[in-house]
Image (cartoon, rainbow, N blue to C red):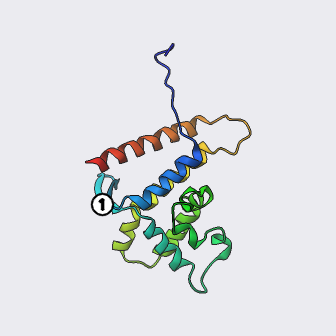
Amino acid sequence: PIIPQRRIYFVPDGPHLLKALRNQLTSHRRPVYYSTGPKGERRACALTLDLLAEAFREVTRGSRVDYKLYRKMRACYFDLDRYSKMNVLAASRIMSRTMLKIIDEFLKDKPQEIKRRYEGLKCYIEKVDCLWKIINSQEHVAVYKLQDLEELLEILEWFLQWGKRNKE
């Protein structure tokens, strides 16, 4: 580089990155470690699409369904084949705030042990949703706030640490 102090950051194509992060949930069933609490203790959590599908199907079953909230979600988004894995729309809806609301609704009356199974998954979706918001900016001018860039770097660091811990 001409200016050694200046860092260059590369973020891959947003839609492909989003699909890859969603597909990660279908291909890796090993425990994923993440930190919780002030002491940063490690807990194992299996991040799978099956857990999301379970929450979605239970919440959207019966008369208590808020169709305005969940109308964009479809059961077929959770049943991936080699063609549906390429669907960016499905990936963006699964890795979204709406999915987090579905999980919260699902966990409302569940025992603590079930809630713990979803902690890491919720954290993963929050990070992916925030990453998607930043790299898929809806602004007409490609100007990011400093706060967005700092948040992006924190998310990328989180994924880096997550990858290192899961190779151990």
Quick one: which residue is furthest to the front in this view?
A: 82
101 to the left or right of 32: right
Question: In this orientation, which residue lies closer to the viewer: 137 or 36?
Answer: 137
Foreground pick, 127 / 163: 163
Viewer-side residue, 1 vs 106: 1
To which quarter of the image does residue 137 belong? Answer: top right
Q: Which residue is mark 1?
A: 44
Residue drawn at (61%, 86%) of the image = 63
For the point 62% across and 36% down, which residue is it? 145
Q: Amino acid at mark 1?
A: Ala
Q: Against 142, is 106 above or below?
A: below
- Residue 121: give x, y in percent of width and height: 43, 61
Q: Position of residue 72 (x, y in %)?
A: 65, 67
Q: Position of residue 41 (x, y in %)?
A: 28, 54
Q: Indicate whether 162 appears above or below 4.
A: below
Q: Residue at x 71, y 42 (%)?
A: 139
Residue that lies at the very extreme toward the bottom in this rendered image: 63
Residue 146 drawn at (x, y percent): 58, 34
Location of residue 86 by image quarter: bottom right
Q: Quadrant of residue 160?
A: top left
Q: Say how many tags the image has.
A: 1
42 left or right, relative to 145: left
Q: Circle 1: is it few (<14), some (14-19), or many (20+) Cα within 10 Å? A: some
Quick one: SS at disc 1? strand
